[in-house]
Amino acid sequence: MDNPSDGLALGPELSRRPAAEAHVTGPKSRSLTAAWPGSEIQQSDVSDTPILTVGIPVYNGAQHIAAAISSVQAQNWAGRLEILIVDDGSTDETQSVLASLRASDSRIRIITHDANYGRPFARNTILREARGRYLAWLDVDDEWFPLKLPTQFDTLYENTFDGEGEVIVMCPFDWKWKGSLRHRTVVPASTADTLKAFLSGQLGAYLWSMLAPTKTFRAVGYFDESLPRLQDLDFLIRFARSGGKIVVAGTKPLCVYNKDDSERTGRVVAGSLAHIWAKHKPLYLQYGSIFALSCRAKHHSLAARHAYSNEGVLLGGYYSARAFAAKAIRLGVVLVTPAALSRRMQRFTNSVRKNRRLK
């Protein structure tokens, strides 16, 4: 379920309670580079420490949360895990559903925000509070297939070598459109240049398909809470910029992504992409101006798609026009590159020689 908060850069001060539930008592400002609280796992009984934390942010997800949790419980993987659910100030029946689920599974741990702060805020709570050595993400309206965890752990172990940088394991997934029979299987692209793939959109920022050591995610830093949308893209650009590697677990889908654009406005998508563009512009430009303009055109096209779906043809047409302008500028750049100028000069020279022969 999408979170309407604008994701202001605030952070909760969590009460340290021995029970399975904690509540945010109020936000305090903090830096995205604030230190992690590092004492919890070391102080706990090793026999009780989970190997894996499954982090699920939720806002008004009463209709979906049971199915998401059930898909975790059905995993063909016998390791110790905790299911860490961060309720970002839900106003529906989410709390009562969670209480019922918690009563039947002691592995469920619930943290409740005292207000709706936004998805990046909730993800940062998960990142900070996870007790497991490994961390996997799941959105409340998506589900896992039973072999997801064993397949991803096998892939992680096969691709983790000392001194070769951090690794995150993605997985193929079934992409389904809500309210439609449309369906396709997506296998994330394997590429040697992870940064370029995230910048260009060749590799989608599908955080909910990912598993890695918790320290790998924490090394990137907090999610940018000024981004109401696409904070996972910004996060993964930073991961790739630092030399992180993405590997894909097989070719068969291991989870279901239920696509729903109904609550994603073009304005918010455009604003988020503009923020990412401004923040990482030097990274785009290091691949050349043509590449950067192509990426910016894709940004405007994505905003247009959401605007047409949710705000009408006027705003959709505006973003489409901006996409067209970026493509036109890109074409102009292509035409004046040294290689292009050389080809045009060669064609002109050949034409002159041909005319002389005809005379």
Image (cartoon, rainbow, N blue to C red):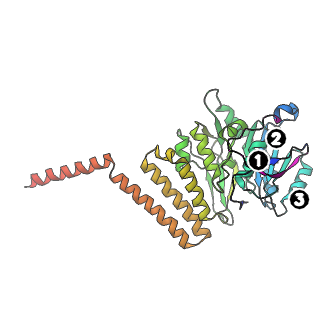
> On the image, numbered disc 1 is attached to which residue?
125
Which residue is at the front of the view, 158 or 50?
Answer: 50
- State the image coordinates of residue 164 (x, y, percent, origin top left): 60, 29
- Mark 2 or mark 3, which has the lower sequence index? 2
Provide residue 248's location: percent of width, then percent of height: 62, 41
Q: Residue 257's x, y, as percent?
A: 68, 55
Name the residue carrying label 3: 96
Report the residue at 62% width, 45% height from top: 236
Residue type beneath disc 1: Thr
Q: Residue at x 43, y 46 (%)?
A: 288
Is the residue 69 above or below the residue 153 in the image? below
Q: Which of marks 2 and 3 is in front?
A: 3
Q: Considering only order in the chain, which callout, 1 or 2, is on the residue closer to the N terminus?
A: 2
Q: Type of residue at label 2?
A: Leu
Judged from the image, the secondary structure of the residue bearing numbered disc 1 is: helix
Q: Distance between the residues labelled 2 and 1?
A: 18 Å
Q: Do the residues labelled 2 and 1 touch (CB within 8 Å)?
A: no
Secondary structure type for disc 3: helix
Viewport quadrant of the N terminus: bottom right
Whether the residues at callouts 3 and 1 have beta carbons within 8 Å, the answer is no
The answer to whether residue 351 is left or right of residue 74 is: left
Q: Give percent across and percent down for residue 265.
A: 62, 65
Image height check: is 303 above or below 13? Answer: below
Residue 317 appears left or right of 65: left
Location of mark 2 (residue):
81
Report whether 290 appears left or right of 275.
Answer: left
**Magenta-colored stretch includes residue 37:** yes
Is tag 3's residue or tag 1's residue first in the polypeptide sequence? Answer: 3
Q: Which of marks 2 and 1 is in front?
A: 1
Segment tinted magenta in the rendering: 19-40
* Any part of residue 253 in sight: no
